[in-house]
Image (spheres, rainbow, N blue to C red):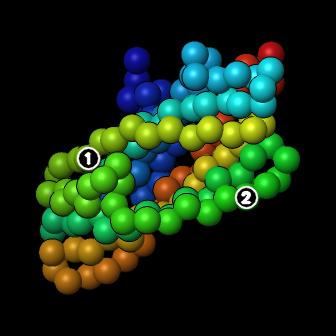
Amino acid sequence: MPFAALFPYSAATRDVMVRVSVSFLPEQSEPSKGRWFWTYHIRIENDGPFAVQLLHRHWTISDGRGGRHEVQGEGVVGEQPVIEPGCSYDYVSGCPLHTPTGTMEGSYHMVGEDGSSFDVRIPRFQLIGPAVTG
């Protein structure tokens, strides 16, 4: 399978690329009770000449009714990873919604070993449950 098919959503900021794949989890969803659940796999690639550290995250999660929820916090999945030049960091997390569709997008706040501080865009990606997939 082509790499782009594994991570269909991507965004580059400076020398950092964020790639996302998303999967609906029917075994953790209960549509009859208004609960849909997805996992998303994030790969953060450092194509720059300096190591970078992910310090904070900011997410905007929108449901199929237009409701928005902001999530902010330190690091990701309990870590504040340092990503060396030419390396990547992967993690998997999840998102429940009360609608069968939604979107997620956001940013990571990074600091470079060169002293720079910057935000890296997380591309908007779709959360689509089976009720709307045809």
Q: Is residue 50 left or right of residue 74?
A: left
- In the picture of the structure, the residue carrying the numbered disc 1 is 89
Gap in Å between the C-alphas at discs 1 and 2?
A: 28 Å
Task: Give the residue type at disc 2.
Answer: Arg
User: Can you say whether 34 is above or below 130 in the image?
Assistant: below
Q: Is residue 88 left or right of residue 95?
A: left
- Quadrant for the C terminus in the image: top right
1 or 2: mark nearer the eye:
2
Where is residue 15 drawn, in percent x and y? 31, 63
Where is residue 64 drawn, in percent x and y? 80, 43
Which SS class for mark 1? Answer: strand
Residue at horizontal 14%, vertical 57%? Answer: 84
Residue at horizontal 62%, vertical 18%? Answer: 26
User: Can you say whether 104 is above or below 27 in the image?
Assistant: below
- In the picture of the structure, the residue carrying the numbered disc 2 is 68
User: Can you say whether 62 is above or below 30 in the image?
Assistant: below
* Residue 55 falls in image quadrant: bottom left
Q: Nearer the viewer, residue 124 or 24?
A: 24
Q: Is the residue marked by circle 1 packed among few (<14), some (14-19), or many (20+) residues within 10 Å? A: some
